[in-house]
Amino acid sequence: MSSTPAVTPAALREAIAGALHVVKAYDLAAACEYLGLEPQKPGEDPFSSKRIYVRSRLQKKTLSELVDIARRVISEYGDDDLQALVSALGARGVDGEMKNLIFAADGPKPQVVLPDSISNTIRIVKNEQYCLVYDQPLEDRGLSWSDLVAWWVRQRPELAEDATRARVSMRERLRRSLGNNGAELLVFDTYTKLGFDLPALIPQVYLHYDPYSLADLNGVSRLTRQRMDFLLLMNQRARAVIEVDGVQHYARQDDTLAMQRSGTVWLADPARYAPMVAEDRQLTLQGYEVYRIGGHELRDHAAGEAMLTEFFQRLLSRHGHLQPQ
């Protein structure tokens, strides 16, 4: 987990107001409008306190909106303290727009064709009924549970009159994609207890895609990881990949020893581990955050839930979706 201190909306509001203190009082109203803040209202007076005038226009802004305003202020006026705060938030995230979000497959692998490679348009030609495809524009704040439920209801109008039923229906469909994987179900269920006004934890997301099966390829995989266990799409294009690692991620079964010892025997397998780590590096260089959770950490349900709750709270606080605990 990162030890970087969280940057709060209050700190950003104060820093923006401080950076704009260099603007003359008689120019401040116009400067605020230029930066996208609301116009001056009757009875307001930037001459009495420039800081109060600016802070009042920032009070209802989200962290994502404050960061955008801060960048505009830095570009226009420059300010070392404000720049330091924005830099503390880290990289903006993954460049480029989200084109295709295929997730929560609960059956055979979908077969995909590319009818328009220039526009990166895809079409699922087989097994579409077993996966979900989110086809709405992605807001700068990421993809929230409410966004996902609104999309879910558009596909199922019979749920439109009952918000609770719609949430439960979507949640159960997402859980179904995890099958009987107890560790992944614990991760998903623990996250959903944190609240509805948060980024959605999206399970089983296709990251890369190879249309051929391992049988077609004589057992040789051409892509290290085709699916992510979980994906969070957060503020400022931040994308966090959550992987739950069982023993099969870094070891292999030894059939000879298993026969001798009358039980499953696992041996460390560096050749299996190395490609996984290499793929993590590539994702990180693209702007993703990659977090791995060892399945062994989740063997005790209560301890695992406590660890996951703290982890998610810190991650969401780091990206401005929760107040620091």
Image (cartoon, helix red, strand yellow):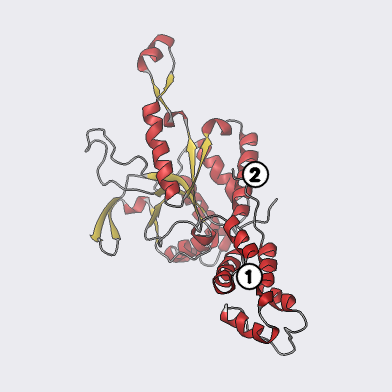
Q: Residue at x 63, y 39 (%)?
A: 307
In the picture provided, is 235 more to the left or to the right than 131? right
Q: Splitting the image into 4 quarters, where does residue 68 fall?
A: bottom right
Q: Position of residue 265 (x, y in %)?
A: 43, 18
Q: CA distance from mark 2 to mark 1?
A: 26 Å
Q: Position of residue 278 (x, y in %)?
A: 39, 39
2 vs 1, front mark: 1
Residue flagged by tag 2: what amino acid is it?
Glu
In the picture provided, is 273 more to the left or to the right than 218? right
Q: Which mark is residue 170?
A: none
Specify the farthest residue to the bottom: 42
Depicted 193 relative to depicted 153: above or below: above
Instruction: Please state which of residues 14 and 153 is positioned toward the viewer in this rendering.
Output: 14
SS class, disc 1: loop
- Mark 1 lies on residue: 61
Q: Position of residue 135 (x, y in %)?
A: 39, 63
Q: Position of residue 108 (x, y in %)?
A: 32, 44
> How packed is label 1: few (under 14 Cα within 10 Å), some, or many (20 or more)?
some
Specify the farthest residue to the right: 48
Q: Quadrant of the N terminus?
A: top right
Q: Residue at x 53, y 63 (%)?
A: 141
Residue flagged by tag 1: what amino acid is it?
Lys
Q: Splitting the image into 4 quarters, where does residue 101 fall?
A: bottom left
SS class, disc 2: helix
> How packed is label 2: few (under 14 Cα within 10 Å), some, or many (20 or more)?
few
Q: Is residue 59 visible?
A: no
Q: Residue at x 38, y 30 (%)?
A: 272
Q: Which mark is residue 310?
A: 2
Instruction: Indicate which disc, 2 or 1, sits on the residue closer to the N terminus.
Output: 1
